[in-house]
Amino acid sequence: MADKSISFMRSLCLGDIEEDVIVPYPSLPDPERETLRSVCTSVDELLTPNAEAFREWDVAGELPDEFLGQLRDFGMFGLVIPEEHGGMGLRAAAYSRTLQQVARHDASVAVTIGAHSSIGMRGLLLYGTEAQKARWLPKLASGEMIAAFCLTEPGAGSDAAAIKTTATKDGDGWLLSGSKLWITNGGIADFFTVFAKSGGTDDRGKLSGFIVTRDMPGVSVGPHEDKMGIRASSTTAVYLDNVRVGPEHLLGPEHGGFKVAMHILNSGRTGLGGGIVGMMKRLVELTTAQATSRHQFGRPIADYGLIKQKIGQIVVECYAAESVVNMVAGLIDQGYEEYAIEAAISKVFASEALWRAVDEALQVAGGNGFMREYPYERILRDCRINRIFEGTNEVLRLFISLSAMNDVGTQLKELAAGLRGVFDHPIKGFGVMSAYALRRASLATGLRRAKGAFTRLEPAVAAEAALFATCTRDLAAAADRILRKHGKEIIGKQFASSRLADIMIDMFVLACVLARVNAAIVRLGPANAAREREILAVFAGQARRRIQANFERIDDNDDELIKGLADHAIEQRKFSWDNI
């Protein structure tokens, strides 16, 4: 049985391929699969009649109360809430797949449901006491209360520790004061998961989470934000003016709010990922229909190679995005404790893959894609937010790489400490040549360690498995080299960190695609899984070229020149060269 405390990517950066974590590729049990099919069919029946209305609601910038009532009646606000509290009790993979089905119809609806279930009331599920769950979960399941997640502030976006909302002790409770910005569901929510500074105004690290309800004195919301995309979803500011909350409203441990917030975001990423995959599948349908119906030079444009290239690439990246999103959901459902890096990778890769896909789909549509009559421009506007909310992709890249290098740094410190006095007692000191030291020796000599290669994959994917093993060795060496080069200054070396993150992103997605295609070969046989095998070959080749380019640019790059040009532009506040 696999160790549930293992992180695949943390281990990978140390040169170990923890095969048992991702092989076999996770799949839904048959009973859960049947339930999910029924749910997805019902979602289609509920949302399909509103196809034209979604476009109108986007223009109006609001979901009408009548439609929200339909979502309540269907049970869309109780997807992840346990059955004993009135919900459907869907696990991560089934929830992700349900939001995928919703997003195929409309992103604003998916975001409204996702903000409620993925993050708005997720903290109550993860950290709530039994009394708290009994008090609020039934109302959240029925949709009587809709939930919102209140972390972001005007001066604190990705830097959550910089929030200024305060929680001041008041008897056995607290007084909350401050404002929250860009809160999804803010205008329709009655249940707010709020994070406030509880350790004094000068203590960045001490945050606490609280349950706040709209009916509390001092709670108010701002007007509906006029947004670029997901316009029909409610986004407002939330204001807290000396809102008194008792001890029964504390969510998780006092001063433990940062961990609570990060756990909520990590746990909820499969909902966002599911929505992204749903939109990508919709784009495949739209683009193939457009390419076969539109004729140029006497032939459907689907006959032309450059159009086939666009469609084929969308298919490859849709498969890859779904593979990584489902893998993370599978890790959660199997009870793995360490999946924060993997969840962050799934968000970064999927959101950027969708952006590329919608851009190419709009290009295939030509002039039609630019018109509001067609769905492309709305999908483009809707999907742009995915690279920003729930952690910007830039900050998540730093999180991905610095988390891995922290592990490498810990190993280096342990090795350095163990080597002290080795030459005074060489026989005794030989015992420290284990763990990381042996990894270093194997990386330097090119020798494969037991965990440096896959051992359980089918022969049909041997070439990609061998490529992955080679990249693993190079990744571990690169992480070690970067850390030795920059030491404690690595925190400020964002270019180097971002390149390492991009390598890690490609490698985890490749591992997920590899595991999924391997499972298809086992289930269907090599012949019947031939198309999936082709997807693997394409993605592996593209990932290999990107990975190699990033390895090469670790030491050979133009980073300082780019930063110098940025400094010049910032100083001048303009583009300095003109032809007149």
Image (spheres, grey):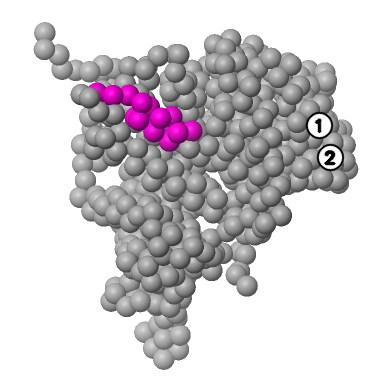
**Residue 291 is inside the magenta segment:** yes
SS for callout 2: loop
Residue at 44%, 13% in the rendered image: 372
Q: Is residue 357 left or right of residue 9?
A: left
On screen, residue 103 above or below 322: above
Q: Which amino acid type is marked by label 2?
A: Gly
**Closest to the observer, 438 or 374:** 374
Q: Residue furthest front?
A: 298
Q: Which residues are magenta?
A: 282-296
Q: x, y (%) of residue 483?
A: 36, 57
Residue at mark 1: 142
SS for callout 1: helix
**Closest to the observer, 235 or 81:** 81
In what quadrant of the picture does the C terminus appear? top left
Q: Which mark is residue 86?
A: 2
Q: Residue furthest left?
A: 579
**Residue 505 is inside the magenta segment:** no
Q: Which amino acid type is marked by label 1?
A: Ser
Q: Is residue 567 left or right of residue 347?
A: left
Question: How many residues crowd mark 2 within 10 Å: few (<14), some (14–19), many (20+)?
Answer: some
Disc count in the image? 2
Residue at 44%, 74% in the rendered image: 455
